[in-house]
Image (spheres, rainbow, N blue to C red):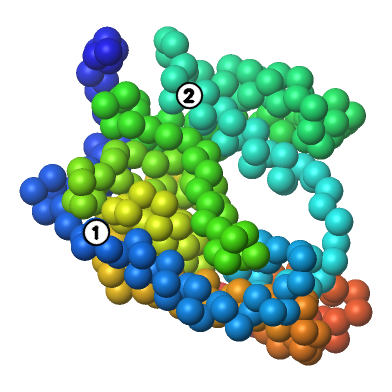
């Protein structure tokens, strides 16, 4: 069914982002149909020695554990040992993403506050841990949740042009690859995808919605998703984009075989260290950073304490 909405007038940020994401339709790469099998084989060949250490408990590999274990291994172990609990920052992210999901198919003019209110109502009516948290959260937490999530949704609507059905927008798309009959599970959830492949010609764009400063790990996250997407459908995505809602700009990377190979190597490296630390008991390598501030192990970690103290003493630029 054709999209009946009138063509909107785009602001400059929307026009620029649309041009980046759309690219030149005549310049879209074509990939070998056997690439998906090559990527899976590369992962399985390198990860086969890990299986004997797993026992009956599968190894789950996702973007956040990968980032942690390839950063500070001490922080990775500390976070793995912590039972999951809903917190205001986690809840804000989920609510904002739910509201953006609603915006894609919203009838009429999408108003950020209305989208967030509807997202909170739907999530509160659920039967999971987030619903429990929303039902018992304080008025202060609810007010902050509403305000921060509304700001993020407003940023999305101001940067992205209205997403037409013909662009095949999909939000919160789950992707999963199982190796060795599920002994190792690679999984992810893509914030937003646009387009689709045309046979072996790439056409899909994978998008992560971000706030704050760009980091190298953000593009690494998308490379991981690109590997999973390629194994799943056979044709890689065309473009990876981290879009920073508070800055109004994207960080993009075109997908090539070399980019996918880098994603495979990083996944193998992360999975290997996860097994070495959690299943074989190797000592963690500590790599202090600003992330020490939020590390559960900070109260007993001298390395992290010394790093933060040294950073606090560092003179600032005038």
Q: Nearer the viewer, residue 281 or 309?
A: 281
Residue 218 drawn above or below residue 261: above
The location of residue 42, given as percent across then percent down, is: 42, 75
Circles 1 and 2 in contact, beta carbons < 8 Å: no
| Residue at x 57%, y 55% (from the top left corner) | 187
- In the image, is 72 to the left or to the right of 44? right
**Disc number placed over residue 204 in the picture, else none:** none
Residue 189 drawn above or below residue 43: above
**Disc number placed over residue 33 in the picture, else none:** 1
**Residue furthest out toward the left:** 26
Sort mark 2 into few (<14), some (14-19) or many (20+) by Cα contacts within 10 Å.
Answer: many
Q: In this view of the protein, can residue 22 be seen by the observer?
A: yes
| Residue at x 13%, y 45% (from the top left corner) | 25
- In the image, is 287 to the left or to the right of 115? right
Q: Nearer the viewer, residue 49 or 14?
A: 49
In the picture, the quarter occupied by the N terminus is top left
Pointer 2 residue = 103
Q: Nearer the viewer, residue 99 or 29?
A: 29
The location of residue 271, given as percent across then percent down, is: 61, 74
- In the image, is 217 to the left or to the right of 54? left
- In the image, is 264 to the left or to the right of 282? left
Residue 51 drawn above or below residue 179: below
**Measured Cα–Cα span from mark 1 to mark 2:** 35 Å
**Residue furthest out toward the front:** 181
| Residue at x 37%, y 74% (from the top left corner) | 261
In the picture, the quarter occupied by the C terminus is bottom right
Residue 116 drawn above or below residue 77: above
Question: SS for tag 2?
Answer: helix
| Residue at x 34%, y 39% (from the top left corner) | 194
Q: In this view of the protein, can residue 19 be seen by the observer?
A: no
Sort mark 1 into few (<14), some (14-19) or many (20+) by Cα contacts within 10 Å.
Answer: few
């Amino acid at each position: 069914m054709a999209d009946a909405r009138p063509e909107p007038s785009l602001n400059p940020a929307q026009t620029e982002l649309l041009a980046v994401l759309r690219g030149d339709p005549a310049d879209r790469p074509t990939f070998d149909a056997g690439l998906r099998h090559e990527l899976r084989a590369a992962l399985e060949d390198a990860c086969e020695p890990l299986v004997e250490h797993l026992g009956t408990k599968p190894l789950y590999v996702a973007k956040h554990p990968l980032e942690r274990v390839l950063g500070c291994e001490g922080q990775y172990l500390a976070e793995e040992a912590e039972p999951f609990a809903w917190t205001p920052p986690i809840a804000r992210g989920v609510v904002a993403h739910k509201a953006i999901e609603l915006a894609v198919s919203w009838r009429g003019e999408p108003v950020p506050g209305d989208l967030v209110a509807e997202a909170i109502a739907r999530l509160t009516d659920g039967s999971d841990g987030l619903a429990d948290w929303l039902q018992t959260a304080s008025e202060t937490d609810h007010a902050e949740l509403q305000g921060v999530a509304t700001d993020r949704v407003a940023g999305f609507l101001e940067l992205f042009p209205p997403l037409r059905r013909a662009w095949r927008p999909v939000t919160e798309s789950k992707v999963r690859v199982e190796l060795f009959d599920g002994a190792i599970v690679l999984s992810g959830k893509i914030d937003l995808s646009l387009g689709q492949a045309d046979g072996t010609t790439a056409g899909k764009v994978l998008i992560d919605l971000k706030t704050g400063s760009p980091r190298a790990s953000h593009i690494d996250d998308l490379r991981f998703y690109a590997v999973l997407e390629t194994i799943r459908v056979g044709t890689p995505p065309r473009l990876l984009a981290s879009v920073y809602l508070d800055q109004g700009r994207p960080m993009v990377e075109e997908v090539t075989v070399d980019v996918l190979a880098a994603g495979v190597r990083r996944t193998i490296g992360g999975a290997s260290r996860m097994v070495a630390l959690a299943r074989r008991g190797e000592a963690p390598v500590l790599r202090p950073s600003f992330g020490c501030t939020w590390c559960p192990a900070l109260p007993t970690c001298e390395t992290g304490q010394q790093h933060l103290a040294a950073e606090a003493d560092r003179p600032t630029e005038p």
